[in-house]
Image: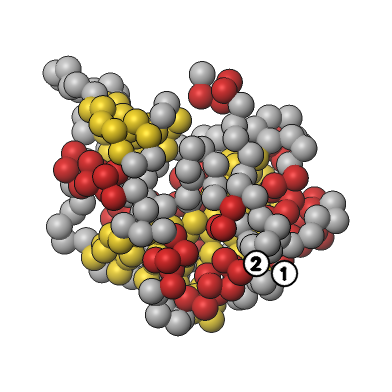
Amino acid sequence: MGKSRGPRRRSVAVEAVTEAVDGGLAQLIPDPDRGRAWTLLIDGAPQSHVDLDDPAYLSFEYQRRLGHVIDLLAPPGKPVQAVHLGGGAFTLARYLAATRPRSTQQIVERDASLVQLVRRELPLDPGARIRVRSVDAREGLAKVPDGWADLVIADVFSGARTPAHLTSTEFLDEVRRTLAPAGVFAANLADGPPLAHLRGQIATAAARFAELALVADPAVLRGKRFGNAVLVASDGPLPVAELTRRAASDPHPARVEHGRSLTDFTGGAVPVTDSAAVASPAPPPSVFR
C-alpha cells in the first residue's frame, strides 16, 4: 500500500465546483486539510473522496475496506485486471493504479456528464491504463471478455440506492462470466435495520460463489444503524485471516463475518432473481447530516 504523506492544508481558498449531471446535482468540495483533495457529493450524498497528490489515500470507510481487498488480491505490486461498476470520482481505480502499476482497468459509469466533470476537474494519470465506458453497469459488463477480470467491484448507486438489476443472481452470473477462475467480486452494499436487503444479497452471492466474506461496522451488523457493508465473493479461497486483521486495525474498525456465522446471519433469506429484485433501501436523511 502506498504511504500517505500526511495532511497538507490548502494555502489558498479553493472554490467548490457545482454542476448538474445526469444523476442530480454534483458538488466537488475541497478538503481543507489536504492540498489537492476533493469530496464528490451527488444531491448532497457523499460519493467519493480523492487526493490527487496521494491517490493511495482512502478517506471513506467502505473505500478503505475495498482497498484491503485490492491489497490482498495478489502479491504486493503485481498488476491485475479490474472492472469497476460505478465510477464516482474514480477513487478505487486511482488507488489500484497507484498501488499496482501497469494494471489494466475498466470503469463503467452510466452518468456521462459526471464522467466529463471528473475528467475535467480531477484528471486521471495519463499513464494509467484506465478505460471509462459511459453505459449501464450490466451493459458494460456484457462487453468484458470471458475470464478477463481478476477483480470486479460493484459500487453503483442511483439516488443513494443500488439499482434493482444489480442485485440479482442473473447479474452475478454475468459477473462470474467475466472473472478469472480465482477472481474476486466485491460489492459495496448499504442497508439499515432490519437488514433484509443485506441478508438477501448474501444469500444471492452464496447461490453463485463458493466463498464469501462480509466486512462491516459491528453496529451495522447488529442492525443498530444504517451503513455500508462490503461483500467479498470468489470461487477460490479468500484471505479471511488477513482481511480480518486489517479490518480490525483500521481507523474505523470493522468485523469480518464468514463461514457458518455468515450463513447464520442471512437468517433464511433466499436468493434474489431479476423478476423479484428491488433497489436497495434509501438511507434516512440523518445519515448525511
Front one among 259 and 25 = 25
Nearer the observer: mark 1 or 2; the answer is 2
Q: Position of residue 28 (x, y in %)?
A: 28, 31
Q: Residues within 10 Å of mark 1 (few under 14, many from 20)?
A: some
The answer to whether residue 50 of the structure is visible from this angle is no
Against 255, residue 71 (above or below) is: below
Q: Residue at x 68, y 30 (%)?
A: 225
In primary-sequence order, the first of circles 1 and 2 is 2
Q: Is residue 202 above or below residue 283?
A: below
Q: Position of residue 259 (x, y in %)?
A: 76, 62
Q: Position of residue 201 (x, y in %)?
A: 68, 55
Amino acid at circle 2: Thr
Which of the 4 image quadrants contains residue 167?
bottom right
The one nearer the camera, 130 or 21, is 21
Residue 280, percent from left and from top: 62, 44
Would residue 196 be seen by someone viewing this image from the given angle?
yes
Q: Which mark is residue 19?
A: none
Q: Which mark is residue 207?
A: 1
Q: Is residue 123 left or right of residue 23?
A: left
Q: Is residue 242 above or below residue 171?
A: above
Of 57 and 289, nearer the camera is: 289
**Pointer 1 with pointer 2, Cβ within 8 A:** yes
